[in-house]
Amino acid sequence: APAQTATPAPTAVPVEPARVLATHPHDPGAFTQGLFFADGALFESTGQPGESVVREVDLETGKVRREVRLDPQYFGEGSTGWGDTIVSLTWKHGKAFRWDRKTLRQIGTFTYPGEGWGLTQDGKSLILSDGTPELRFLDPVTFAEQRRITVTYQGRPIRRLNELEYVRGEILANIWHQDLIVRIDPATGVIRGILDLRDLAAAVPVTDPEAVLNGIAYDERTGKLYVTGKDWPSLYEIALPSR
């Protein structure tokens, strides 16, 4: 009889509990969609119609240093720094804004098909999530799509990837409504590790079911990693995942 070809067993994906190293205040009215550092300064973009802003935040106090409000029709989403600018997404309008990072003055717009969820960059491309299992790599100057990857866990596509952060050669992503951060290989889309934040999230004093974990920021200057959530009163420094 012909030999049976065995299906390869799914590769075990390491799960690592998040270790909190420090706690900082966070604006409990900030519906966090994007969180990133640029030149050592912390920036945040928030959602909700009429409340969406792009702001610089003081890490130690949680106070807003300066902010710009989006037109009330827009539901703000993810954001990232690029050079001396900030790029921020909107949820359903297919429109991205470019802001001058020093003045927060709007200096450009782009359009893109589908929804906007999370945004980060790897030094070459902007990386956008849209609620599907696909991440798009975009030209930071023209917003033209360069390529896509499908994010998979043990071969299955994973949806609802939200806020993104590029950290030490991996894409970290919140999964909407799960207290987990997945570590994605940017070449293949394969999830190669999981940060488990369930204990951390369970201890956050929020009652709104939409006040979910969302916000990952890596400060390259200090090598520190931070997370928060929508309307969370705290922002947490957590240990970097094991390599």
Image (tube, rainbow, N blue to C red):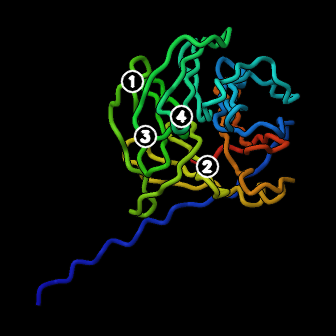
Q: In the rendered structure, which disc, 4 or 3, sits on the residue that comes first in sequence?
A: 3
- Check whether the beta carbons of the residues at disc 2 and disc 4 lie within 8 A of each other: no
Tell me the SS state at disc 1: loop
Vertical arrangement, residue 202 with respect to residue 93, above or below:
below
Which percent across, then down, holds residue 128? 47, 36
Q: Amino acid at mark 4?
A: Leu
- The amino acid at mark 2 is Ser
x 74%, y 57%: residue: 209
Crowdedness of circle 3 by 10 Å Cα count: few (<14), some, many (20+)? Answer: some
Mark 2 → mark 4, Cα distance in angstroms: 24 Å
| CA–CA distance in space, label 1 to label 3 | 17 Å
* Amino acid type, residue under disc 1 in the picture: Asp
Which mark identifies residue 126?
A: none
Q: Between tags 4 and 3, which lies in front?
A: 3
Q: Are marks 4 and 1 in contact (CB under 8 Å)?
A: no
The picture places residue 69, in percent across and down from the top left corner, at 70, 22
Disc marking residue 114: 3
Upstream in sequence: badge 1 or badge 3: 3
Give the mark nearer the N terminus: 4 vs 1. Answer: 4
Q: Earlier in the sequence, mark 2 or mark 1?
A: 1
Q: Nearer the viewer, residue 202 or 168?
A: 202
Residue beneath label 4, please? 119
In this rendered view, identify the residue nearer to me: 232 or 116: 116
Q: Position of residue 237 (x, y in %)?
A: 76, 40
Residue matched to label 2: 242
The N terminus, quarter of image = bottom left
Q: Nearer the viewer, residue 177 or 52?
A: 52
Along the viewing direction, whichever of 15 and 81 lies nearer the viewer: 81
Q: CA distance from mark 3 to mark 2?
A: 34 Å
Q: Secondary structure at mark 4?
A: strand
Tell me if residue 223 can be seen. no
Q: How far apart are the two marked residues, 4 and 3, measured between alpha carbons?
A: 14 Å
